[in-house]
Amino acid sequence: MNLRIALLILAFSPLALPCHAAFTLVPGVDLYSEYNDNIYLSSDNEEDDVITTVSPNATMEWDTPRLDVSLFASVTFEKYLNNTDEDRIGPGETTQTSSLNALARLYREVFYLSVTDTYTRVPIDEGGRGGEGNRTINLTDSNTLRVNPYLQFPIMKDTRLTLGYTYTNQWYEEEEADDYISHTYSASLSKVLSPRVSASLSGSYKEYRPKDADEDAICTFFGCIEDRGGNYEYDEETVSVGISYQATERLSLDGSYGHTWLDYDVKGKGDTDIWSASADYEITSNYSVGTSYEKSVEISVSDGTSKNNKYSAYLRYNDRFTLNFTLNVQNVEYIEIDREEDSYGGALSGELPFNEKTGLTGLFRYTNYDQSGVDAEEYDRYGTRFSLYYDTRLGRVSTGYIYNRTESDRDNGDYDNNIIFISASLRF
């Protein structure tokens, strides 16, 4: 049951004039129970268990002439039948998931304030142990807060200047992950060149400040003797130019090119090109394809910054059933530690309705991963998920099966995992 209420409120206005606001609140609960034959993804001495979770949640939308807010909040109570040390039930132990997006128009169409906050569970090591349905291994709670006041000025016809500042506060539950605060100052100039073409020129300056910064690294031309990774302060300067081209009604092209300079407090300087290119084409109303390439500098959870090269492609079909195929190839070169990763893989997912209420969903995922340097490893990882569902007036009830397998060149690196589950996602 959606509660849609028209409210008379005082908006953000110097005159405090009343205006109408749209408010939507949707409460819900997600129920999930599974039998898992290898909860720790172990190569031997596997431990099985029955895990039950209850997740009350709420979705809220609030739109006014001067303020737009969307919020999703969920708290998950997690109970293990045998391994009760893994329970997450009491205060400070539950798993939270939340997403806040707020945009305030503080002064006319010039001064804005954007606030986002995301609380979720993320992998500590992207290449570490994992699989479909994993809820125990190589994971940490994460909260990302971003506050972004910015100004927009129309300086001439079809040309806009944007000046902004972004404060980021990144927190992780596990000590091995790297909390940080960053301050980013940015400027961009965008221009509509024609009905089909637009261009932009942008620059930014970022101060990256770990909350537990390492100031004792001894560095030479050959590298640093003490090298923890992710704990070094640095300043980052970036400039880039971009262009978007709507070639036809069905084909869109986007591209950008730039350069980034990193200036470390104790590790010296470095720089790299950054660029991106993408194409999306709607073959028919039912088929669409796309491809993209991106070279960027990213911040990892626990190993500092890295140079990322990522290629991806997709094919989507949506008519009597849905089908999505994605392909990814990626190279990650870490700047602060001796580590490089190459990976490739793909995923095939879809949904086949039998009638208006019942159907089948499926997923198959494959990844080949090759890490050199620190903790070198190569593995093939397979994951599948199938479920039968039934749609009720309140939401979807489903039951299914998950299988994970990893084949590694490390000793004790292989493991299998089988999960049988039943779930219900209800909205009131």
Image (cartoon, rainbow, N blue to C red):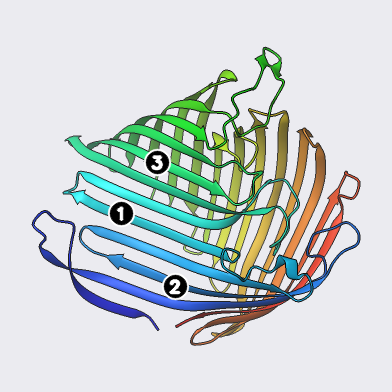
SS state under label 2: strand
Q: Is the residue under label 1 in contact with that under label 2 (CB below 8 Å)?
A: no
Number of residues whose C-alpha sits closer than 10 Å to that of mark 3, classed few (under 14), some (14–19) or many (20 or more): some
Disc marking residue 58: 2
Marks 1 and 3, how far apart in space? 15 Å
User: What residue is drawn where x is 68% and y is 65%?
Assistant: 363
**Amino acid type of the residue that numbered disc 1 sits on in the rendered structure:** Leu
User: What residue is drawn where x is 36% and y is 32%?
Assistant: 185
- Residue 295: tell me if it is visible: no
Left or right: 116 as drawn, with respect to 95: left
Disc marking residue 123: none
Residue position for label 3: 167
Q: Is the residue under label 2 in contact with that under label 3 (CB below 8 Å)?
A: no
Vertical position of residue 90 compared to residue 267: above or below: below
Q: How many marks?
A: 3
Q: Looking at the image, tell me whether mark 1 or mark 3 is earlier in sequence order.
A: 1
User: What residue is drawn where x is 40% and y is 41%?
Assistant: 167
Q: Looking at the image, tell me whether mark 3 or mark 2 is earlier in sequence order.
A: 2
Q: Position of residue 78 (x, y in %)?
A: 65, 71
Q: Position of residue 108 (x, y in %)?
A: 16, 49
SS state under label 1: strand
Residue position for label 1: 103
Number of residues whose C-alpha sits closer than 10 Å to that of mark 1, classed few (under 14), some (14–19) or many (20 or more): some
**Amino acid type of the residue that numbered disc 2 sits on in the rendered structure:** Ala
Q: Say which quadrant the C terminus sits in.
A: bottom left
Vertical position of residue 9 compared to residue 366: above or below: below
SS state under label 3: strand
Q: Looking at the image, tell me whether mark 2 or mark 1 is earlier in sequence order.
A: 2
Q: Position of residue 84 (x, y in %)?
A: 74, 71
Marks 3 and 2, how far apart in space? 27 Å
